[in-house]
Image (spheres, helix red, strand yellow):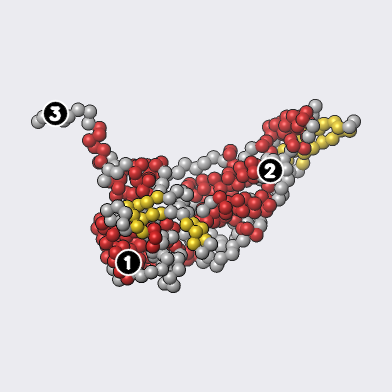
Amino acid sequence: MAGLIKRQFKSGSVWYIQYWEGGKQKRIRAHESERIAEQMKRDFEDAQAQGDASLAFPSRTPIAAVVSGHIEHIRTAKTPKSAQTDIYYLRDVFGPVCEALNITGRKVSLKVKKRPPKLGQDRRRKSPVIAASHFEAITTAQIATFISGRMASRGLKPKTGNRIRDTLSSLFSWAIKQRGIRMPGEKNPVGAVAKYKESAPEIRYLTREQIASQLDALEEHVQLQAMAATLIYAGLRREELIWLTNEDLDLAAGKHGMIRVRAKTIANESWQPKTKKNRAVPVSSQLRHYLDKWRLKHHGGRWLFPNSEGGRYDPDNFASDLRALNVKKEVGWKADEGDLFVPFGCLHFRHTFGSTLAQRGVSLYQISALMGNSPEIARRHYAALIPEAMADLVEFYPAPAV
């Protein structure tokens, strides 16, 4: 049998498990919390009965070893873009604790950050990271404090706070299940971190008049015009558009053709759709007009929409080129005074496709299939746009004659 004893230090109280072994009394540090220490004592006694008491205590693994192993895992299990997003959050949480978290690309300037620093924020002061003597010593309180601190100092939205939480939860779950990491109480510390309540998504989409103004503004840039039209009339993601090859455009299929969004490996570089599912999107008569116009100018090559050197167009460069033209020509949403405050962008075009289908009464299941989303995502984004299409569905009986 084992017992608990409490010792008081300047930093606070600590509970120890005290037991006898080989006629000698021994003591092992348990935890600062009496409740957790009690659970550890029970686990210790169970492990003693099984002949290996060491299994009852948390392991002591360097944070760098766990994080680097997890990054190696997600690079193979996730799409490159999704893996890179997780790595960004892990670097923000732990700092450059291992080589896998080092920034290997160019230095990012403040001008291109999605969310600029708040007024009065001292850029010379580095934000605190989660630090511990070993991975198993990271606590729920540290994680909750880190996320709330980031949200307050950077003005992050609840969705981003929850994304940080989910990234850390995946890290700890992987470490426990795949690497045999023994956490205190055998629990994922992120599980007790409360999720933030997310607000309803703000969906911006173009009207018919705005679509015309956008495509007219790109009249002198035939490729960008065709790319914007493909996003608007086919609802593709930016990465899906960039990875289209000439073979993916099947103009012999359907009434006006088909765009096939599918996984591929080109020049030893592999890519797959975000949901890891291939799909086909019909080409409309409106889109066919702009695709034919572009194909008359574009001859040969592998990529449907290549860069200036004939290679694959970088998605960030495409978005930057489009934004620059829209800002120059003041194409986008404008304030009451007439000043441009939100230029049209790739996500607006994708939402235009989904929103237009919803307003026409297309089912959310069909919208999700065309856009490569789950039905739940389609419902969250576009369900509010279809009440007029369902007006007749609530009539139980024929309207009375007047």
For this rendering, which residue is in front, 248 or 217? 248
Relative height, residue 278 to residue 227 (above, below): above
Q: Give how far across and how far down residue 147 sits, in percent.
A: 56, 48
Check disc 1: other Cα within 10 Å, few if <14, some if 14-19, many if 20+.
some
Q: Amino acid at mark 1?
A: Arg
Instruction: Look at the numbered discs 1 and 2 and tell me whether their residues touch, using CB distance below 8 Å.
Output: no
Residue 126 in view: yes
Residue 41 found in image quarter: top right
Residue corresponding to mark 3? 400
| Location of residue 135 with respect to 215 vertically, above or below | above
Of residues 118 and 394, the one nearer the viewer is 394
User: How far apart are the alpha carbons under marks 3 and 2?
Assistant: 71 Å
- Mark 1 or 2: the one toward you: 1
Q: Residue at x 24, y 37 (%)?
A: 391
Q: Position of residue 64 (x, y in %)?
A: 67, 53
Q: CA distance from mark 1 to mark 2?
A: 56 Å
Between discs 1 and 2, the one toward the N terminus:
2
Q: Position of residue 303 (x, y in %)?
A: 41, 65
Q: Mark 1 or mark 3, which has the lower sequence index?
A: 1
Q: Residue at x 59, y 49 (%)?
A: 146
Quarter of the image for the C terminus: give it.
Answer: top left
Q: Nearer the viewer, mark 1 or mark 3?
A: 1
Task: Read off the residue under disc 2.
Answer: 181
* Residue 223: percent from left, percent from top: 35, 67
Q: Earlier in the sequence, mark 3 or mark 2?
A: 2
Reading the image, the residue beneath label 1 is 295
Asked if labels 2 and 3 touch by Cβ distance under 8 angstroms, the answer is no
- Residue at the limit of the structure toward the bottom, as seen here: 309
Q: Quadrant of residue 230?
A: bottom left
Query: Is label 1 in a helix, a strand or a loop?
Result: helix
Query: How many angstroms separate mark 1 from mark 3 (CA)?
Result: 56 Å
- Judged from this view, the residue extending furthest toward the right is 23
